[in-house]
Image (cartoon, rainbow, N blue to C red):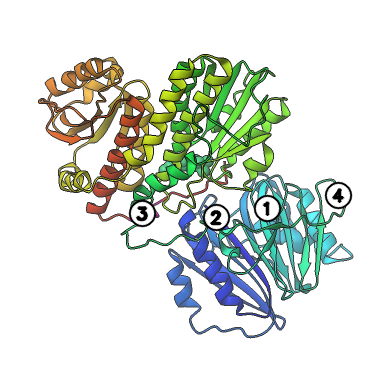
Amino acid sequence: MCGIVGYIGYKKTKEILLDGLSELEYRGYDSAGIAVLQNHTFSIFKTVGKLVNLKQKTKSYHPEGFAVGIGHTRWATHGKPTELNAHPHLGENSYVVHNGIIENYVPLKHELQQKGVKFLSQTDTEVIVWLFESELKSSSTPFEAFKKTLSRLKGSYAILLVSKSREDTIFFAKGGSPLILGINNADEKYFASSDAPLISHCKDVVYLEDGDFGYVTPSEITLIGANGIQKMPSFKVLATDKLSAQKDGYRFFMEKEIYEQSDVIADTLLGRLKDTHIAFEELDKDFFKGINEIKLCACGTSYHCALAASYLFERYAKIKVSVEIASEFRYKKPLLFKDMLFIAISQSGETADTLESLKMAKNAGLKTLTVCNVDNSSMVRQSDAAIFTRAGIEKGVASTKAFATQMAVFWMLSIYLADKKHSLQKDEIQKHISLLREVPACVKVDEEMHEKITRLSKRYLHGHGFFYIGRDIFYPLALEGALKLKEISYLHAEGYPSGEMKHGPIALADPELFTIALLPNHMLYEKTKSNVEELSARDSTICVISPQQFKKADDFIQTKQTSHYMLEFFEMMVATQLLALEIAVRLGHDIDMPRNLAKSVTVE
Ligand code: M6R
């Protein structure tokens, strides 16, 4: 989604801004721009499409010496991806970049238009800079004008604003969208909407909090908190491990991330699997005391993990679980009780709907836990406790290893809770621990299977849609398999519980409907098999993923014989990821940055 960078200093401002934006590229965007203020003059460049276009446009621009710069990658929400709508947006003498959505931009725009302002773009963002210009006329300082501007905005934002009215300064504000300030010893200041652009430049960073605003100059940081009182910036050392990811010889980040799953799951398990029990250092021993129900809340792939986790919690820990899509939960006025534990699941920790749901639960007095891949993310900072999935940076927009590690965490957590609640016998707990130890080996990509899937993929490039079907915990996996395919192949795919076919979906069955059937040995094999047969009888083209040969299938992807359905789950997960990848490769799509999608969805 949208990305922000900012820089004040003496180094190569253009390169710092463009490199910073490149680090944010994987998050998804459709236009980009930079504005540099130097010697009383703004240089501004904007382009539609990939950053390479912006790099081309700025090829002969080389600012030397002190400069103040801001940059942005935009994922269109208000107005099409055009140069005019790309950030930074200009007022009279100032430029702004903004992540988030200004919800009251329509009345603000009317008000400013009545004062004679001519808007150039269709964006909500442009009102910020014009409001600032307007407030500037009646304020004693530019900072006062900035403060007054912020007080008029409703919605979510991370904002950087530079102005000729105060040339050596970047004004900043955070309200709901992430923003980080970084410093080093060279009197430089950096801003970014996530860690990655800061890594090669700063050691010390401040993760700004909602309501924070202020300004920086080369020698000064002024930070005001949500209560309006000036505060000391609280610096943290920027963690640099696993943050910079390269493709390492793989064709795509997504492919690399599928192949990495074995290693990262080993990290997820590290120190948590003991001989006789499971340990989570992050949770104090009474964390689950007084908890009678769990509410799991997430979006997209993380929501599929939540659904899968609900099967594990109920089956092993015998606890009531409800699962919520965050964007629905926020507005349904849910019943919340103090004996509920609210668990937010998120790769990024910044997804706007999940973050707001977490805040709602917190405000209602619920205990909160975040299962997340990003240390210091907004959700981690908001919740009572956090468990890290340890997947390392995930660059492919289509989530793979983050899901895999989330699933490993929830398998462990359900057994951890089962142990606390004595709902499993000690020997059963030990059995799960041994099985969990097998997961890294089980998700190692089998080259033969990959090759087979590559060959098969050519038969699945047309048709009128895909059904992914499975039962029990293989139903959320079917949903996830379908989402993976949709995201990168742009083919229509749906996940269904296989028992639901006869209640409507089977009406679509014909040879041009492709069914991907998840048929594990150790979970309702016969029941699922009957459902697949029903589809086969209606001539749907069927690809079965199973350890057992299935005669009525058109195609067959064989998984290994294992001793438990969860091991089958992980292996089938890999098969569905590879199938989506190879179909999309044949269709010639952008695997890591699929159209219309963003890695971190920071608007609702
Ligand atoms: O960062 P989060 O896990 O909160 O993100 C939630 C979804 O936006 C995300 O899982 C999305 O569905 C992915 N593109 C799936 O591949």
The residue to which callout 2 is attached is 2
Question: Which SS class for mark 3?
Answer: helix
The residue to which callout 1 is attached is 109
Q: CA distance from mark 2 to mark 4?
A: 27 Å
Q: CA distance from mark 1 to mark 3?
A: 46 Å
- Examine the residues drawn in magenta and state their main secondary structure: loop
Q: Nearer the viewer, residue 592 or 71?
A: 592
Question: Which SS class for mark 4?
Answer: loop
Contact (CB < 8 A) between labels 1 and 2?
A: no
Which numbered disc covers residue 256?
3
Q: Residue at x 50, y 24 (%)?
A: 415
Image spot of residue 185 (x, y percent): 72, 73
Q: CA distance from mark 1 to mark 2?
A: 22 Å
The residue to which callout 4 is attached is 228
Is residue 154 on the magenta stretch?
no
As shown in the figure, which amino acid type bears the numbered disc 2?
Cys
* Viewer-side label of 1, 4: 4
Give the number of callouts: 4
State the image quarter where residue 515 is shown.
Answer: top left
Image spot of residue 545 (x, y percent): 22, 32
